[in-house]
Amino acid sequence: MSVHTSPLSATASKLSYERERLEDIGYMTCMTLTLLGNYAQTGHFGGPLAYTPFNVAAHLAGPELGGLRYDYRRPKHPYGDKFMLAAGHCAPTCYALWMILGQALYRKYQATGNRRYYVAPDVAMLPVDALGFRRGAGALKTLLADQGLSDHPLFAQAKGRGIRALSGHIESTDVTNDVNGGPSGVGIATAAGKAAFWDIVGAPMGTGDQDPGHRPPGGQAAPHLPVRQQCRHRRFAHWRRGAQEVRRLPAG
């Protein structure tokens, strides 16, 4: 998988980024979403795979290269960038990436005990949630118990929090999204309206923790707090040379 970014300016084009690590995360995302689909015996593989380069770049390239400013630990913060995939049935690429990011932080916290890597279990999307893809919340309550796996160490992440039900299209319960998009992306108007609201009210600028959370997991994986504290919903334009342009809703 190849990740391409569209620099926002001549200055941005000179910024370095860890392409090999982005491609590694992209490959892991593709393999994870394929596992989700095979396990659930469902379709919609082509779209999520095609959207993966943009999804990974948007979440991990960093704001200097046009990526998102967000905090995985507090993804619903009103001033954090939000990410809504209008192509609803392409949601598996988002699920897969959010699981990878959640697991990276989980492992880092387990290894170091440093609270900067801690994500509340009910906020994070974790590998155990792969069992919840296209399963209802009711069935998930007893899924492990019915198979005698409640105490199996491989499913320890389900203790207390349970398994998250993943419907297969974008919902407000997702990580970096806060609008129900539906299977056909009907929520895009709501997302645009929320972005316009924050522009109109003049969401304040701010500083904040400079931890490079946009970098791929493995190194410094702690997400940063929003630096430019302004909520911006990304809208998809057109796919070109393996990546999509990010267009921001103009102010006013």
Image: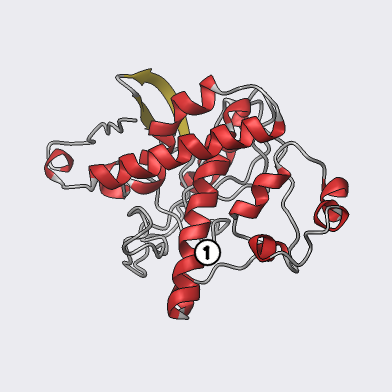
Q: At 47% from the left edge and 64% from the top edge, which residue is drawn?
A: 105
SS for dot 1: loop
Q: Does residue 36 appear to the left or right of 204 in the view shown? A: right
Closer to the camera, 176 or 167? 167
Q: Does residue 16 appear to the left or right of 216 in the view shown? A: left
- The quarter of the rendered structure image containing the N terminus is top left
Closer to the camera, 49 or 230? 49
Q: How many callouts does the rendering have?
A: 1
Counting from the top left corner in percent of width and height, residue 170 is at 64, 36
Q: Residues within 10 Å of mark 1 (few under 14, many from 20)?
A: many
Query: Circle 1 is placed at which residue position?
Result: 73
Counting from the top left corner in percent of width and height, residue 179 is at 64, 41
Q: At 86% from the left edge and 46% from the top edge, which residue is drawn?
A: 139
Find residue 158 and report its image quarter: bottom right
- The quarter of the rendered structure image containing the C terminus is top left
Residue 226 visible in rendering: yes
Q: Does residue 152 appear to the left or right of 232 in the view shown? A: right
Closer to the camera, 195 or 186? 186
Counting from the top left corner in percent of width and height, residue 242 is at 33, 23
Q: Amino acid at mark 1?
A: Arg
Residue 248 visible in rendering: no
Find residue 239 and report its image quarter: top left
Q: At 63% from the left edge and 31% from the top edge, which residue is drawn?
A: 37
Q: At 62% from the left edge and 37% from the top edge, which residue is drawn?
A: 36
